[in-house]
Image (cartoon, grey):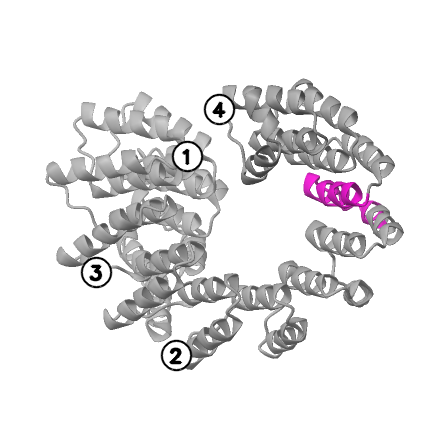
Amino acid sequence: MYTQHNELVSFFHKLLRTKPRPSVIEFNKLSSSLAKMKQFQTVISLSNQMELVSVKPHLYTCNILINCFSHLQRVDLGFSILAKILKLGFEPTIITFTTLINELCRDGKIGHAVDLFDKIVAIGHQPDVHTYNVIVNGLCKIGNLHVAMSLLKRMKEKGCEPNVVTYSAIIDGLCKCNQVDEAFDLFKEIKSQGILPNVVTHTSLIHGLCYSSKWKEASALFEEMLERNIVPDVVTFSILVDELCKDGMIVKAQSILSRMIQTGVEPNVVTYNSLIDGYGLHGQMHLARKVFYVMMRKGCNPDVHTYSILINWYCKNKGTYKAKQLVNEMSSRGLVPDHYVYSSIIYGLCHARRPWEAFKLFKDLCATGYLPNVITYSTLLHGFCENGHFDIAFSLFDEMKVTNLKPDVATYNILIEDMCKAGRFKDVKKLLSNLFIDQLRPTIQTYTMIIDGLSKRRFLDEAYQIFKNMENNVCSPDNCSYNVMIHGFLRCKDLDKAAELIHDMRGKGFSADNTTLMLVAENKAILKLL
């Protein structure tokens, strides 16, 4: 590839020196070849050299440049070439506009992409199926299915038949918006129309079905793929492994991995990471480590995320020593531990009731130039609170603010929960006040933790007042809030109030949790009130 690149560049320079100079078409052929080799910067450089010796660009030259800038994620420079096209008196083609629309979508500027699409239609350009596919895919990725479906309808009305790429994008969008039944219906509909779903279509739908725990349907679809000789790729297999692991079906996930290898598809780092995470989730660290060694033996190098997963689960399973060894191993492999890695180690040390050791690690890291993030601070705050060192926790909280690292609601919730458990309600009140000063809003979880803390300390009047005020704070009580408040009344034998809340909870479509049912069973007199 490198030799071919040099030969093309050398020939390009030879053409520049030729007398008389060849037409721009010859230069375009070379630029096109280099662009196909992904030598985008080279193409741009050679284009500049062409202009310096007065080789006038053609529309095709400009389209190649727009494509290069698109791949380099410089949509702004792509539009400057569009302006140049118009200045030279050329008429941009649908390919020109499609390339720009595609780059806007990749840049996350979907609104601008839709605007450009509408403008080119308004000035008389007829989008082809590729243009529609680009914009439909962009809309589906941000969950704007309503507009995507409108475009699908417009395509058909304009006589531009959607293809498997169009439908695959919409099926993927539906699945990501948890509309898997609608996605499955569309899947069956396009098959009945003679449009054959490809590996991408199947993979999106399998992912949606797995995410919705519809394992029977996902398994049937997977088998259907194989029967139709649609070979699942590494993405399909990795999704199956990942979702099975998340749902606790490790044996099934391992079976899919074996089948994957038999099919001739090599697992990648994503596949192995999912399996390692699955074993870690179930505390089977010896098997997680075994997978780790297998992937290295197979020549699949672990990445930062692989180490992060292992370190996290070692820390959660009281294996901080092994976690620290892995951090050293990462460094020896040239991998830089991230915030997640250090937060996991700090969590592990705090969980093992070694907060001062965690604090020393924290300070040592800061001395080396490491900039802790909100998660790292929050983990350390929780560790000190959990071990009864509240003053140190609040000192760290103040230090966090001094460093211009703004606490988020999750940080406040950690402190509020720990203060509630310790019965330090003055601190809770102060934290709530500071939360509003920091222009944050308490969540349902915030209020529920305070209600629970007050109820357990038998401050029922205060707890109920907060419960009633939740509506006023644009934060309506949810199922958990109702159950927590009911627990408080049942524990204090206030059966009338408990019964009233149970009726109210049912009226709003919520249901009693196991603790509520157990407390009702212990206070059988309440059954007469229900």
SS state under label 4: loop
Say which residue label 4 marks.
Answer: 509
**Spatial distance from mark 4 to mark 3, Cα to Cα?**
45 Å
As drawn, is 215 to the left or to the right of 193?
right
Is residue 413 depicted above or below 127 in this figure? below
Judge whether residue 21 can be spotted in this image. no
Q: Is mark 1 in CB contact (under 8 Å) with mark 2?
A: no
Please identify the quarter of the rendering in which residue 170 is found.
top left
The answer to whether the residues at label 1 and label 4 have Cβ atoms under 8 Å apart is no
Between 78 and 510, the one lying in front of the other is 510
CA gap between label 2 and label 4 equals: 52 Å
Q: Earlier in the sequence, mark 2 or mark 4?
A: 2
Alpha-carbon span between mark 1 and mark 2:
38 Å
* Numbered mark located on residue 496 in the image: none
The residue at which mark 2 appears reads as 298
In the rendered structure, which amino acid carries the disc numbered 4? Gly
In the rendered structure, which amino acid carries the disc numbered 1? Answer: Gly
Q: Position of residue 406 (x, y in %)?
A: 75, 42
Dot placed on the residue nearer the N-terminal end, 1 or 4: 1
> Which percent across, then down, holds residue 220?
21, 51
Q: Earlier in the sequence, mark 3 or mark 2?
A: 3
Q: Relative to 100, does residue 362 appear above or below in the rendering?
A: below
**What residue sits right under mark 3 in the picture?**
231
Of discs 4 and 3, which sits in the foreground? 4
- For this view, does 423 lie left or right of residue 301? right
Q: Residues within 10 Å of mark 4 (few under 14, many from 20)?
A: few
